[in-house]
Amino acid sequence: MFAPQRPITLLLFHLFNSVTTSIHRPPAPSPDPSRLPSSTSPVTTPFTSSTGESSPEAACTLTTSPSTLVVRFGDPATVNCSRSKMEFTPLGWNAPTPVPEPMVAQYLVWSVDRMTEWSIQLMCYALIDQEGQCQINVPVVVYKPPDNVSISFVNHCGAMVEGHRYSLQCEVQQAAPVELLTVTFYKGQTALARLRSNNTVKEPVTEVFTLDILPKKEDNGVQYWCEAELELGPEGPKHPPVVTSQKFNASVNFGPHLHCPEKLQVREGESLVCDVGGNPQPSVTWYRDGQAVGLPTYSSRKHAGKYTAQTRGHLGEKNFTVEVEVLVGSGTANSCNRYILSAVVLIQMIYRL
């Protein structure tokens, strides 16, 4: 009774089988292990970057946060690698241990509890359908502030002499990396120079920076000092590590120097003042017409003429000649007369009120 329906049943079976065959999709092949980079040997491909962003012309959309890892030696560190959209291909890290297992995910984190290496390489990778592998390199800066910073003279101690050349040295002990170290020399609050090192060693080293100076008499008593700063960029700490040296007061020997014009004008009744300074303070003897004299405290026309200051100090002997001109009037007596006249005028104005 069912025999006539058998061809129809076979026909329906073949139709259903053809439909299911057309929509059947074979499972995605598992990644070839040879295409995955080892934990020690990064695979070089055209789709690489070292700036924290993947190459725009490739289908590689990897980014890392932070784009540059700046970490203090001994501190924990974390870098997150992510892609812009979810893809069903492995995402992995090529980095020092511990290395997270590659996985199909939108992001993958690499982290260490304590950074104990000075020079490491970090690379995040992903497999892209048909294009191959894309990867992104993460620059790493492992830093250590200086243990100590000190300033001193090179082959000199004691006071300096005006006009002589000296060398200051700033010693920065056990800092890393010194290629990112900037040393600034100061005189008071004035920056004299900013120096950098060309040493590319990653481990902590002691570096000495030198600066030549030519002191003047105005520098006597000023403070010299230096500071060392690690310039770690925008990914570094908000307040970069800065270590300052001690400050020392400079002593500059100078002179003798004359502190008045060589042609000096005074008015009658005024004191004749002309100082000679130096460090140390020199001894001074004034002469006029070959005779030792004292400078007059109440000048008159008879005090006009040439005076010679004979000085003797730590830096030797030196003579100065001053020509004095005494102007008539407007001295002490005339000053008193002006005060009296002003008082009289003021009294008259009061009586008129």
Image: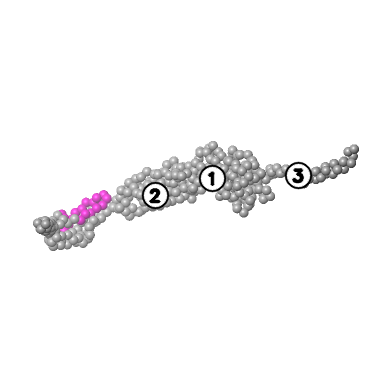
In the picture, measured across the screen, residue 340 lies left or right of residue 206, that is: left
Spatial CA span between label 1 and label 2: 33 Å
Q: Give the residue pinned by disc 1.
A: 66
Location of the N terminus (image quadrant): top right
Spatial CA span between label 1 and label 3: 43 Å
Q: Give the residue pinned by disc 2.
A: 185
Give the secondary structure at mark 1: loop
Mark 1 vs mark 2: which is more N-terminal?
1
Q: Does residue 203 appear in the picture of this structure?
A: no
Q: Which residues are magenta?
A: 274-295
Q: Residue at x 42, y 51 (%)?
A: 194
Instruction: Report the amino acid beneath label 3.
Output: His
Q: Residue at x 60, y 39 (%)?
A: 99
Instruction: Report the amino acid beneath label 2.
Output: Phe
Give the secondary structure at mark 3: loop
Instruction: Report the amino acid beneath label 1.
Output: Pro
Judged from this view, the residue extending furthest toward the front is 1
Q: Does residue 3 appear in the picture of this structure?
A: yes
In the picture, measured across the screen, residue 155 lies left or right of residue 198, that is: left
Mark 3 vs mark 2: which is more N-terminal?
3
Q: Nearer the viewer, mark 1 or mark 3?
A: 3
Q: Is residue 343 magenta?
A: no
Q: Give the residue pinned by disc 3.
A: 24
Q: Is residue 284 magenta?
A: yes
Number of callouts = 3
Location of the C terminus (image quadrant): bottom left
Mark 1 vs mark 3: which is more N-terminal?
3
The foreground one among 26 and 156 is: 26
Give the secondary structure at mark 2: strand
Q: Residues within 10 Å of mark 1 (few under 14, many from 20)?
A: some
Q: Position of residue 55 (x, y in %)?
A: 60, 52
